[in-house]
Image (spheres, rainbow, N blue to C red):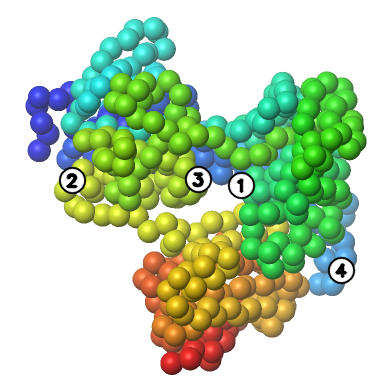
Amino acid sequence: MSDASFDYDVIVIGAGYGGFDAAKHAADHGLKTAIIESRDMGGTCVNRGCVPSKALLAASGKVRELADDSHLASFGIHAAPVRFERQKIADHANQLVQTIRTNLTKTLERAGVTILRGHGRLEGAQRVGLREPSGVDRVLNAKDVIIATGSDPFVPPGIETDGRTVFTSDEAINLEWLPRWIAIIGSGYIGLEFADVYTALGCEVTMIEAMDKVMPTFDPDIAKIAGRHLIDSRDIDARSGLLARKVTPGCPVQIELADFNSRELVETLEVDAVLVATGRVPSSKGLNLESLGIETNRGFLPIDDTMRVLVNDQPVPHLWAVGDVTGKLMLAHTAAAQGSVAVDNILGHQRQIDYRSIPAATFTHPEISSVGLSEADAKTLASEQGFQLGSVRSYFKANSKALAELESDGLMKLLFNKTSGEVLGAHIYGLHAADLIQEVANAVARRQSVRQLSTEVHTHPTLSEVVEVAYKQAASQLVA
């Protein structure tokens, strides 16, 4: 039952995926709920991230498939030269954004959530300030407050953006033009996905990575096979160990490349455009965090596993944070899960979140996915807990469905405890890897053993048999 002494039971600041799930979950459970958003409903994912980028990847993927003459010829298919309309591809992404944004807004309204437009901030304990677009400023009070303000693209010092020739993923999803030669700074999932789009649509790409190897955040074995297909076999010149110390917009764009370690100038590139894909930073400025004595870590809000905001390692009563602003796993589905966990705890149901079981995917062609521990972290855990780490590989080239699709370049690496059989993690590169990882994520969430999993029957012929083979291989290596 709502508390009449407050304007709302719950106020959520930010209407991205984390805020959306928190607000809907709260309203569905009878809490009087408001959500504050200063920009478009849906946050980064819906408007500037996963939704429009997947639309671009879907369209450009079709172009890549139809343009691959040798691949089609292997099926006995001979297609006409491929033509595409850039604007209609961009329109497809924009229309999808509008549809998802509208659906999300209507869902909240049907649930009874009050949508407040403007900038939200803290005004002390259980108080939220709201500056409306008209300039009107007012203060609301709520029994519980959830911060879900998300993140923004990170632009390193020395890089000047103009939104046209030098831009971030926020602008790239509009696909306003196709530069003949584009440099992508960063080889994480954002850089890889846009390299996939641009090369499919005929652009030449130079990929610049500051670390000593390309794709540094991926499993090394997965990065090796994925790099051969996603980078080496395409019109991409990948360079590592180089820092884009200065980028100047214009026609052409000038990039000063320096050695990452010495910071000495190595080369100056002139390209048509630059996409800055160097990660994301939390959107925590302007929240008036100091009103409650909250200190951030590089802008990220410290939280515990119940989503409570911490000050000096102690929870702030009735204050919660979810999503990218917490810096845990900066993924839309992580934010959504955190939102539900926060509300469950507000309702008095003790819940924590299991980050190890949350999967991640890169939607290139083919895809990359992972869940659980990296091999390095798994080795550390094995050393600390005194067990033997197991690692097996399952190859797509032995899978009937992959062979039928002529898409047999793929690998799954499974990490497990050789004594208990517990699944610790998995890393996949190959056809539909983003879908395949969910089965392993479920096993990680339940802390299941490959001993049991190896007896489960998978449909034949399907790609899921790649996972089955890995489970069986792992079960045969158990030491007890």
Which residue is located at x 31 percent, y 42 percent?
313
- Closest to the camera, between mark 3 and mark 1, is 3
Q: Earlier in the sequence, mark 4 or mark 1?
A: 1
Q: Quadrant of residue 421?
A: bottom left
Q: Residue at x 77, y 41 (%)?
A: 260
Sooner in the amino-acid sequence: mark 3 or mark 1: 1
Residue sitting at x 81%, y 72%: 75
Mark 2 vs mark 1: in front: 2
Give the residue type at disc 2.
Leu
**Badge 2 element:** loop
**Which residue position holds label 4?**
73
Numbered circles on residues, count: 4
The amino acid marked with disc number 1 is: Lys
Residue 172 lies left or right of residue 319; in this view the side is right
Residue ID for mark 1:
54
Is residue 284 among what the camera can see?
A: yes
Task: Compute the Cα span from label 2 to label 3.
Answer: 25 Å
The disc, 2 or 3, on the residue closer to the chain's N-terminal end is: 3
Residue behind mark 3: 330
Q: Secondary structure at mark 4?
A: helix
Q: Position of residue 272 (x, y in %)?
A: 85, 30
Mark sitting on residue 347: 2
* Proximity of marks 4 and 1: CB atoms separated by less than 8 Å: no
In the displayed structure, 322 sits above or below 359; it is above
Q: Is residue 108 above or below residue 376?
A: above
